Image: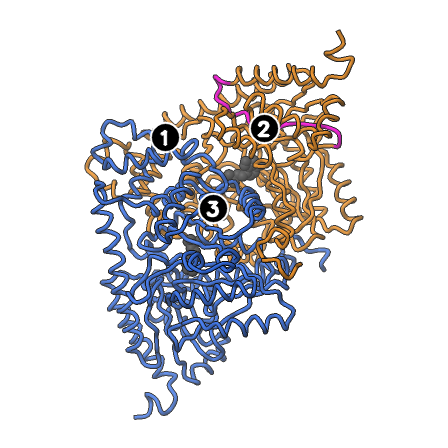
Chain colours: A orange, B blue
Amino acid sequence: MEMSLKALDYESLNENVKNCQYAVRGELYLRASELQKEGKKIIFTNVGNPHALGQKPLTFPRQVVALCQAPFLLDDPNIGMIFPADAIARAKHYLSLTSGGLGAYSDSRGLPGVRKEVAEFIERRDGYPSDPELIFLTDGASKGVMQILNCVIRSQKDGILVPVPQYPLYSATISLLGGTLVPYYLEESENWGLDVNNLRQSVAQARSQGITVRAMVIINPGNPTGQCLSEANLREILRFCCDERLVLLGDEVYQQNIYQDERPFISSKKVLMDMRAPISKEVQLISFHTVSKGYWGECGQRGGYFEMTNIPPRTVEEIYKVASIALSPNVSAQIFMGLMVSPPKPGDISHDQFVRESKGILESLRRRARMMTDGFNSCKNVVCNFTEGAMYSFPQIKLPSKAIEAAKQAGKVPDVFYCLKLLEATGISTVPGSGFGQKEGVFHLRTTILPAEEEMPEIMDSFKKFNDEFMSQYGDNFGYSRM
Amino acid sequence: MEMSLKALDYESLNENVKNCQYAVRGELYLRASELQKEGKKIIFTNVGNPHALGQKPLTFPRQVVALCQAPFLLDDPNIGMIFPADAIARAKHYLSLTSGGLGAYSDSRGLPGVRKEVAEFIERRDGYPSDPELIFLTDGASKGVMQILNCVIRSQKDGILVPVPQYPLYSATISLLGGTLVPYYLEESENWGLDVNNLRQSVAQARSQGITVRAMVIINPGNPTGQCLSEANLREILRFCCDERLVLLGDEVYQQNIYQDERPFISSKKVLMDMRAPISKEVQLISFHTVSKGYWGECGQRGGYFEMTNIPPRTVEEIYKVASIALSPNVSAQIFMGLMVSPPKPGDISHDQFVRESKGILESLRRRARMMTDGFNSCKNVVCNFTEGAMYSFPQIKLPSKAIEAAKQAGKVPDVFYCLKLLEATGISTVPGSGFGQKEGVFHLRTTILPAEEEMPEIMDSFKKFNDEFMSQYGDNFGYSRM
Ligand SMILES: Cc1ncc(COP(=O)(O)O)c(C=O)c1O
Ligand SMILES: Cc1ncc(COP(=O)(O)O)c(C=O)c1O
């Protein structure tokens, strides 16, 4: 039998490929795509993809990149009628950083000039120096995370601490690379906070199973949970990483998405630099960022970076070498990254428009975060922590035992069952909590807070109506059906 | 000692990462970058990166993508002064294929509408149907190759047949994934032709070492060798793949780069479809293409696709799932791909300009291929096959024994020694043949044929002068120093 198989027959594929799970585009997404083809209106809240739900791109960066794509326009005498002077100047600036425009492969780490701008941004943000040679540009943060995990994971015996619930990039990549995910649970009852005791327990348990824990992932602000880590919490984590000799992977792609004032974003890098030696000199940290989130939402451009702290030069060289295999990240997204870290300044022609647009988006997101949380909390058997940051709402759905039974009968995980019913009834495409991990016997769903603000009341009404009917259909006897 | 290592210390990195080699951006490239920083003029012929050497992008596709980046321009009353109507229409067309413009993640396989255009292109090219569901768009062909090899390679015992000399994407990726490269030699004396007997020998030898050969790579037209495979040769290869149950990976990124008329490009897919069952129904084939090559040279955009033939649906699903982890290929390059496979038609406003520009580039490349081959063949101890296709010249350098000795003394591989001297003397940045693989005791270098046509005579003169001096310095007694 094995003899007659070909290499791309399912049975003979790399097992790591088969083992990985990616729920954000899993069963629910596939069913939603089918329904859409059949003509049903689908509200895609399964993935943080703002422009797909109507968010407009910021004008200035798009002007600059359009000019970089069409550099011959810079010689057109009519150009000033269509593009503002500061966009033209910026386009010239970025083109001067390339060697051959957007059509030439860049250095595999990204354009040196853009990496310098990223370093300056980090210095302004944290108040500590940042070295462009330790910043690599990537095709989105996802690719950066995958590159680094590829360096860390050697075998199934290597473990990576990952929060649960987590963004499935991590679980999927760890499976793909043949490593072991070591979960640590976030505390729903404490606003999804991180308890260092949980970390210690997770590491001890993994060790007892022969796993070498090598790295720890934090997502701050959190996806799917929306929590923002406090400075004190970050300090504890760094101390823990120092004690346990773990590399910290700081996924900070939502650093601009903050919807409360008590806990502003603080980078892991800043907290690390604020600490005393040996911690500040010892803990290996990789921080990730992207153009996909914030008020940019330029997901389809695929632009990101990672910054390395306390990583030895020989390792940096190895990461560089591996990045070289795929030649270079896409150059237009590198320029978006440059623009993201050095937006128009006060006094620039485009400054006011830029501020108006970006503020408008952020303020609306803040209102939507509130509308969603409140909407969910007004539903029967649904409880939801406030979205402090990021782009998601992650309500817990207290499924009645009858619903759990019905799901079993249908051969579905209970939250998948619920989300499928929700999709069929309302067109709202969510991701079941099981795709992110959750405690045994507890069920969630994740939705983005991205639908247009004016559609939000209708969406929440339609959710409520569905949920009421669901709970009444599957409610326990002492519930709806009592009277 | 191991206890005190951290996960990103060099000693504790994934060994597969450390083992991989990537010569195109290796020692020579790093030295060239250093010299450039010191102010030396460097001619980067180490990588097929046309725009970096002054090739202008085609106007029409850049206009379309610029408009897609700045869709608000489509409402500007002055837009017709700057962009031709067909570019405007095309931009609207491509935007209508997205859900949210270039800033939204697309389906992880790429935009359905663009995959349909690719399928139509393949149908026109080959005369056989092509299914958009079996076409995945990628961030350049490199990423596609890496995805597929990741599915195929399960362990060190899995072997991939790779031509030698080869493009190091293959050797590096196989190392990174922990597989085994099984070399088959191309015959320099037969214009780098492929002899199926060599294949059989390679497979037999690998088997005797316990390796399961799972796939075979062909690069057609060849990099670094420049040969074009004949139809008869492709048929033999497919028959061989059928007998041995190998997946064929057809790297056809240079399909538009053909510089002779005897052997036009024929796709592996067409040859496969022309053959009888069971071969046409059995052989698993993945074909790769890109926007980086041809007369496009849009390397920095990172756009590519692969087409799957005879791959079972469950495997296609697995490949889709893995592609989902990184969300989507960049959308602007997807549009470049759409434009590449459906360029302006006769009668379109931009048609004549498009034809003029693209023909100009291809004809110049053809002349440059000839100039380089002739130039190398006029040099002492240098012999070079004609570049039938692709973008490279791969001369053999017959190094005198004194030079080999000197290289040894300097701790360098002989061809690296030669290429470094060439770089220091002339600024010409090449890649030593050892980076691609070559027979024991035979030495080459690879250069692209991409320097501007008007600079070509000077470059070849400067090469000749260097080579003369080198051969005279290291020449055997009966050589230059005889008189
Ligand atoms: C926590 C987190 N990290 C990383 C990413 C990846 O973003 P990208 O690859 O678009 O930069 C996402 C995307 O949703 C995310 O939610
Ligand atoms: C033979 C071959 N395959 C694939 C590639 C990768 O091209 P890209 O990733 O830019 O599409 C190259 C680039 O030089 C190549 O020479």
Residue A369 percent location from the top left of the image? 56, 22
Is residue B176 within the magenta segment?
no
User: Marks 2/3: CA distance?
Assistant: 25 Å
Residue at the farthest front position: B277
Q: Is the residue marked by circle 3 packed among few (<14), some (14-19), or many (20+) residues within 10 Å?
A: many
State which image quarter holds ligand 2: bottom left
Residue B256 percent location from the top left of the image? 33, 57
The mark closer to the camera, 1 or 2, is 2
Q: Which mark is residue B321?
A: none
Q: Is the residue marked by circle 1 packed among few (<14), some (14-19), or many (20+) residues within 10 Å?
A: some
Query: Dot 2 falls on which chain?
Result: A
Q: In the rendered image of this protein, does residue B264 appear above or below residue A107?
A: below
Quarter containing the N terminus of chain B: bottom right
SS state under label 3? strand
Residue appearing at x 20%, y 33% in the figure: B81
Task: Count the numbered circles shown.
Answer: 3
Q: Amino acid at mark 3?
A: Phe
User: Marks 3/1: CA distance?
Assistant: 31 Å
Residue A264 percent location from the top left of the image? 57, 28
- Residue picked out by circle 3: B136
Is residue A335 visible in the rendered structure shown here? Answer: no
Q: Is mark 2 within 8 Å of ligand 1?
A: no
Q: Which mark is residue A430?
A: 2
| Left or right: A268 as drawn, with respect to A343 | right
Please give the range of residues in magenta. Answer: A440-455
| Of the pair A84 and B225, the residue shown nearer to us | B225
Residue appearing at x 75%, y 41% in the figure: A202
SS state under label 1? helix
Q: Which mark is residue A59?
A: 1
Q: In the rendered image of this protein, does residue A58 appear above or below residue A289?
A: above
User: Marks 1/2: CA distance?
Assistant: 30 Å
> Which is nearer the N-term, disc 1 or disc 2?
1
